[in-house]
Image (spheres, rainbow, N blue to C red):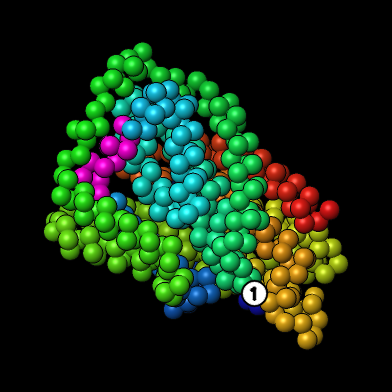
Amino acid sequence: MNAIPHQALAAIVIFAIAYALIATERMHRTVVALAGAAAVLGSGLVPQSEAFGSRGGGIDWNVIFLLLGMMIIVNLTRKTGLFQWIAIKAAKAARGEPFRVLILLAAVTALLSAFLDNVTTVLFMAPVTLLIADGLGINPIPLLIVQVIASNVGGTATLIGDPPNIMIGSAAELGFASFLTNLAPICIAIFVALIPMFSWMFRGQLRPPPDARERLAGFDETRAITDRRLLHRCVVVLALTFVGFSLHERFHLQPATVALVGAALLLVVSKADVDEVLHEVEWSTLLFFIGLFVMISALTHTGVIHAIANWLLGKAAHHPGSTAIGLLWLSAAASSLVDNIPFVGTANPMLAEMAVSLAGPGVPRAVALHSHTMMMMWWSLALGACLGGNATLVGASANVVVAGIAERAGHPIRFREFMRYGIPVTLVSIILSTAYVWLRYIR
């Protein structure tokens, strides 16, 4: 560990106290995150220049501005009635049966998360879910929790579905097809395996009200659209934004840039009241992420995350198979407690260095990175980091975003309530991933 021990200990203590306060909900999570950030900055555990930078485990501004841009686009789109139209269509397709609604929304969320990214997907799907639940007269919390889980599972399947995968793809020089062929099969299997779990976990919470059929009969999607002129402009900007997400690497643009361009364009063409649109932005969620990133930057700066990752990776040369499984479980555990981005950011260069060391002198870097041993490391890291985020409410960006939307709508998701469902789902997902890695890459 590069930093002196007492600094690392202080960073761990501050983060542990903040995490305990968030988990017990004694204080609002945004207040706790900002107070924790102030503590690590004020005590000198991490320089402000590093904490506010985009490298070295600092604030990931790409995440912050991606969220901000998409929140603006979603808020403007909401005014057209498009979400109400989608909600009515979905409710009718599921015939108003709550569990069918839950599975339909989960499947759509997982699919969209694989080909967009999970944060963007839940920004669109969560308002739709709230409208469906309100229209049918059912509790939206089970639907939202399952939606979060589905977004993380679907996002694991592809290169662009989850930020850690983008980072791994860059470090390992792996493309979209590699992620799809190696991770999509297990993600599909996990999603199918979770369906009976959802039925069991939420039994009794998804009973339709006595007037469910009358409510469904009263739904009329033709009257949902309230501003067709704005709708046409939103659809065009949304289409351009989605195209931008799919092509951002080719044009060397970050997803945040695409989202901000889309938001700015829609603000211009819609001629909306900017103050009103910005008032509806989930500022509490954005500030929570900023505080969390700063606290994690202290763990990175003091060497805590590096020490944990280095301890595991140092064993790889002698026991590659067991190390891959260990990396899978460690990254899952780490992602359930902190954002998976700094852990992956720390593990990536060490895995790359290990690849070169294992390959020996004279072996091309690409060959070293793609050896059989290294491939099972990369896929283990991706599965653990992405799926581990389902364990807690702060384990992944999509979780926090949905929690913010739900709280604003008057349906707060409690930390312990989410964990009661998230931990069993994560355990099943990681156990299935362990079997998959063992059978496909180790055996």
- Where is residue 276 shown, x and y percent of the image? 17, 53
Quarter holding residue 338 = bottom right
Question: Helix or strand or loop: what does disc 1 sit on?
Answer: helix
At a point 13% along the width and 59% down the height, the residue shown is 271
Relative vertical location of residue 356 with respect to residue 182 in this rendering, above or below: below
Quarter holding residue 251 = bottom left
At a point 41% along the width and 45% down the height, the residue shown is 403
**Does the magenta portion include 182?**
no
Q: Which residue is mark 1?
A: 349
**Does the magenta portion include 82?**
yes
Quarter holding residue 143 = top left
Relative vertical location of residue 233 with respect to residue 131 in this rendering, above or below: below
At a point 60% along the width and 31% down the height, the residue shown is 197
Which region of the structure is painted magenta?
Answer: 77-88
Quadrant for the N terminus in the image: bottom right
Relative vertical location of residue 26 with respect to residue 330 in this rendering, above or below: above
- Dot 1 amino acid type: Pro
